[in-house]
Image (spheres, rainbow, N blue to C red):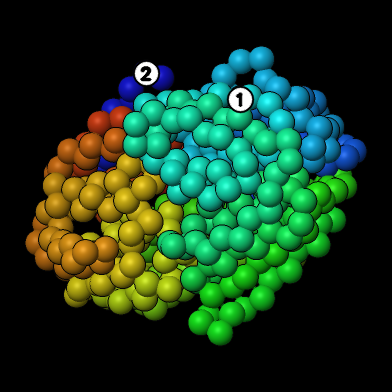
Amino acid sequence: MNQRPLNVSRAQTGLQGTTRVPGDKSISHRSLMFAALAAGQTRVSGLLEGEDVLRTADAMRALGATITRDGDNWVIDGRGVGALSEPEDVLDMGNSGTAARLLSGILATQPFLSVMTGDASLRSRPMRRVTAPLSETGAVFETREGGRLPMAVRGTRDAKPLHYRLPVASAQVKSAVLLAGLNAHGETTVEEPVATRDHTENMLRHFGVNVDVEVMSDGGRRIALTGPAELTARDVVVPGDPSSAAFPIVAALLVPGSDILITGVGLNPLRTGLFQTLQEMGGDLSILNERIEGGEAVGDIRVKHSALHGVEVPSDRAPSMIDEYPVLAVACAFAEGASRLLGLEELRVKESDRLAATVALLNVNGAATTVEGDNLVVHGGGGSLGGGHVVTHMDHRLAMSAVVFGLAAEKAVSIDDTAFIETSFPGFVALMNALGAGIR
């Protein structure tokens, strides 16, 4: 992919208008995987057609599912839980850690050999968090030093059910274990210390799998299913991605004169931590026309420019907004007073060390920060911001956060590369410009 550097200057007018962000990436990945595991034909509408999700489509085709495009819909003829076929070539997951980790759970209990790789960023990310528990099914994983891709998976024919307590809250690890459990004999359980996004549980139920969720005495959750399980084809409507909506939302809060409406955004309560936090900071953000579509809460979000103030975000909110911390940190840099963002250890194993990269983004543009272990303090309201050069480390969310920073800053922000934004948010710059951002 050719590099696409960008210089972003302060928006000259407020952002105005109505828009819709691309489909939810988490739900898009899962809809393709689960449909491939289901018996029958599934139609998916609203699928995110970014590079990450298209890599998942290619992988499921390589594993035997038939996946075609029909107008605005995607049509998947599934193979059944235990009926995938050995791929003839390496599965290239591009930049998608979600796809790689979830697919590891599926491959662990398929009785054949598969090999998975990705781009330079994905090959640098650790896979041990999923391969360690999945090895207990009987599957064998061979990785590079440090548990990194490329990775060979020798799936097991007689998978053992897993009973696993997550040491750190992670929807990806939880989902990988549950997906392995679909083709294991007996009850698979996952205990999570705090609730993480539950798209896997919701979609498994949508496809006819009985999933039990119990709130434990310590506030965590225990999720259980019994395998072998059967999935029955069901159509899926993918809502707008709240993680993608975060960028125009924060931009509208920061750019004077802004008033925008984003329609059809997913409002799963385990994904809306950013919206709650921005409201606590004084953001004029309102939810309209709430409804249920395809088993997920959906609504429209209206945002107006607001004077923000500092806030403390508790660690137990982190799982509901883990991907939104970089752009939240941008909002905090322009808020009055200090903001404390607690419990960010999961950020260290994203597309980059996202915590370190976020700190670098802020510091190079004049915003003061303090890192206290896994906590980040952003000291807002100080001096002239902007003027820095942001190194994105091929992290799409860092790149989009830097764009938002530039739209609100006094001095232009330069970004080393924005080409990979298309992997998760195709048409991002065009959408922002349609609202009046003026990015050239």
The residue carrying mark 2 is: 2
Q: Is residue 5 left or right of residue 23?
A: left
265 and 39: which is toward the camera: 39
196 and 360: which is toward the camera: 196
| Residue sitting at the far bottom | 217
Q: Is residue 368 left or right of residue 314?
A: left
User: What SS does tag 1 mark?
Assistant: strand
Residue placed at 68% from the left, 53% from the top?
Answer: 161
375 and 146: which is toward the camera: 146
226 lies above or below 404: below
Residue placed at 37% from the left, 18% from the top?
Answer: 2
| Residue sitting at the far right | 40
Q: Which mark is residue 296?
A: none
Q: Quadrant of the N terminus?
A: top left
Give the mark, 1 or 2, whose residue is nearer the N terminus: 2
Between marks 1 and 2 in the image, the one whose residue lies nearer the viewer: 1
Residue 309 lies, in percent from the top left, at 27, 75
27 lies above or below 272: above
Spatial separation of the CA atoms under disc 1 and disc 2: 29 Å
Q: Which mark is residue 114?
A: 1
Residue 15 lies, in percent from the top left, at 42, 53
